[in-house]
Amino acid sequence: MIKEEFYTIGGMSCAACSSAVERVTRKLDGVVRSDVNLTTGKLLIRYDDEKVTPELIIGKVTKAGFSCEPANRQKKPAEKKRTADTPQIVRLTGSWIFTGLLLYVSMGSMLPHPVPLPALFDMHANPVNFAVLQLLLTIPVLVWGKHFFVNGFSALLHRNPNMNSLVALGSACSFAYSLVLTFLISANPAHVHHLYYESAAVVLTFIMTGKYLESRSTAKTKDAITALMKLAPDTALLVRNDTVTEVATDSLKPGDVILVKPGSRIPADGTVSEGSSSVDESMLTGESLPVDKAKGGTVTGGSMNLNGMLHVTVTKTGADSTLSQIIRCMEDAQGKKAPIAKIADRISGVFVPTVMGIACAAGIAWFAAGMDAAFVLRIVTSVLVIACPCALGLATPAAIMVGTGLGAANGILIRNGEALETTGKITAAVLDKTGTVTEGKPKVTAVLSEKGVNERHVLAYAALAESGSEHPLARAIIAAEKAARSPDDAATNGTGTGDAATAGGKVISFKNIPGKGIVARAELKGSQYFIYAGNRRFMDEESIGVPAETETKAESLTKQGHTITYVASERIDSGGKSYGQAALQGLIGISDTVRETSIEAVRMLKNAGISVHLLTGDNKNAAEHIAKQIGADTVKAEVLPQEKAEAVKNLQRAGERVMMVGDGINDAPALVQADCGIAVGGGSDIAVDAGSIVLMKGDLRDAAKAVKLSRLTLRTIKQNLFWAFLYNVVGIPIAAGALYPFTGTLLTPMIAGFAMSVSSVCVVTNALRLKTKKL
């Protein structure tokens, strides 16, 4: 069976490290996919558990020189993050103090206003003491930066050289060269002018500083997940036998009843069994307005109960909860690489060995040109230190992490990096009608009455007749009649609307005639009636006349997508004998109304250069009317689920990159077929599972926002990759001395180290700019 798991990888410092982990795991027979996210330090691996075991994965990664353990995906972030940073801050502060002193000792005499050293350490009077003092000031910096040497040389031994290897080699060369000269100074004091202790110390200090700033910036890219993890409270108030007990949230199980007080977060998904309140779901859906909840309403774990006491029956807990699924989707999205990342991956795999080769070649070339050992050392060290695989490795994952976080904050749940990239390239959007463009709930949108009959009278008769039916159209009529009642109607306790003919009515018998309508026998104010409600065919069979004018109006409504229900009544005696012919009272038009946001959503998609196509299994009249309302480019009605997928294929064959937006089970095949499937939140589980993006608010405008988010993220990734490539393509030749023959310009290892640190921070900072964008 194929399994998919996350592992936490320790010891990675650059893209070469992540490439090495991917390389060793992909070599395992049975591994289907292996992706490492350098930013999160996570390995996402899919494998056949009959061929591969977790122990084998851990063993291979460990053998490659990295730590590896199964990731606890639901673990909350540590509350004492600042405490964890303290040792790093201490090391960094100490390094800067000793490096500053070292620069004062080695370069103080070069300042415009020289700062003299004590005679004991004077460069000319006591060169040995001068060198030993620099050695003593350098050693603490090397100790604080020992992880570069441990990790770097370990990676070399495992034949997986990385950024640490470059830093370790560069610093070690400078230090070793200076150490040898220190022992030779007593014999030849001139060697005191060629010490490079400060290069080793400054390089390490700059890079430690850069790594610290990079880690702080990278941590900000995880803010969205961190915020979501903190939403679920640690404890819940469990109600059992009228007793309230505080228990751990993890101990809750489906069926438990919990008490949620005003101002507290809801511990788990559930259904309101008692009470009413307003609930803030903004952190989960991006919807800023509170949502009213009453008995029977569903609530989501992590949302905030604002003003009422609620009793909630738990339905989902732990990994099955909505909050956990959102977090899991975000982690999956950040773990699965976007196609554009493969460019950087291919380069990162050979980057470090190539840089080491360039450093050696440059050193040999300059030595052959007659330069001394100090010059050659400066060249080799600068090349090793300036090269930055980190910027390449961070370019894509940093942007994807911020992009998925921004999406989640706006109620757009992106399942994988590929979807985030693909969505921005969409040229055609296929929209399902029912439940996506429309509300998905039939509503009474027109009531027409015959001469001398009140429209409310027509609605009340129909509601009385339909009161025993569960058909969606019947429910729509009953809901409309209830909404139309005036305050005075409550006193009648009837189904009517205050009209003398309908107040206090009750149904005696009810008969459903499939495909036609219903006939109900009802008692109204002491008299009995047959009430007929159904289609035109039903009226004809019951010999109920429909005036030509009424028929014309009905045809007009039908063309506008309405379903017509004709309403007629016939007065009878207690034995069921008619007093006369049944007469038409009027008709009711029922339709699925367009969501308020759909028209604007289509406009946003078109402004983004995307053609819009409406696809539905509904009748042609209804489909064409809705398409005209929203401004769709094309419409196709009465299609089966498999035909929806075929329609998507046809667009793809025409060269379009297709986005499918739907919410029903019948949309799932098309969602899978599309280049990007977007499921509307609140739809069927099958549709949501088939979508690579989920709109948590069910707002179609978010589909257009997803396109904008994708384009912004893709642009940021391209900017990052351009900067990373440009930096290395320009920086490495300059460090190798390419400008020296023409301008005499030669980088020092210190400047090279500073440039390397800045490059990584720039990439992450550029990714963080996405947070400021408005979708």
Image: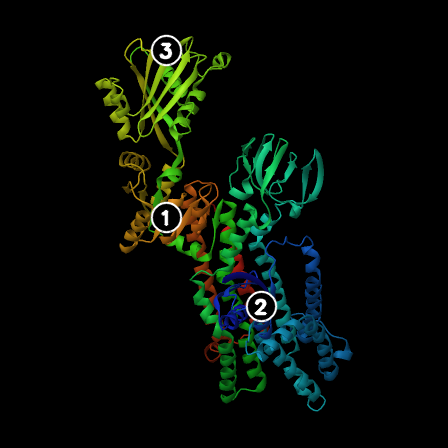
Give the answer, above or below, for where 525 lies relative to 715: above
Residue closer to the observer: 555 or 265 = 555
What's the image's color scheme? Answer: rainbow
Q: Which mark is residue 575?
A: 3
Can you tell which quarter of the image residue 557 is in? top left
Among the two numbered marks 2 and 3 on one chain, the one whose residue lies closer to the N terminus? 2
Residue sitting at 68 percent across and 67 percent down? 96
Q: Which dot, 2 or 3, sits closer to the camera?
A: 3
| Front disc: 3 or 1 | 3
Residue at x 64% of width, y 69% of height? 205
Pointers 2 and 1 in contact (C-beta within 8 Å) = no
Secondary structure beneath dot 1 equals strand
Distance between mark 3 and mark 1 Cα atoms: 58 Å
Q: How far separated are the C-alphas under marks 2 and 3?
A: 91 Å
Q: Position of residue 419 (x, y in %)?
A: 43, 54
Q: CA distance from mark 2 to mark 1?
A: 40 Å
Mark 2 or mark 1, whichever is nearer to me: 1
Q: With respect to residue 49, does 166 lie above or below?
A: below
x and y percent of residue 173 in the render?
61, 81
Rendered location of residue 455, percent (x, y): 35, 16
Q: Is residue 110 left or right of residue 627?
A: right
Q: Quadrant of residue 376?
A: bottom right
Q: Residue at x 63, y 64 (%)?
A: 209
Whichever of callouts 2 and 1 sits on the residue coming sooner in the sequence is: 2
Residue pictured at 59% horizontal, 31% vertical = 277
Q: Badge 2: few (under 14), some or many (20 or more) residues near its Cα, within 10 Å?
A: many
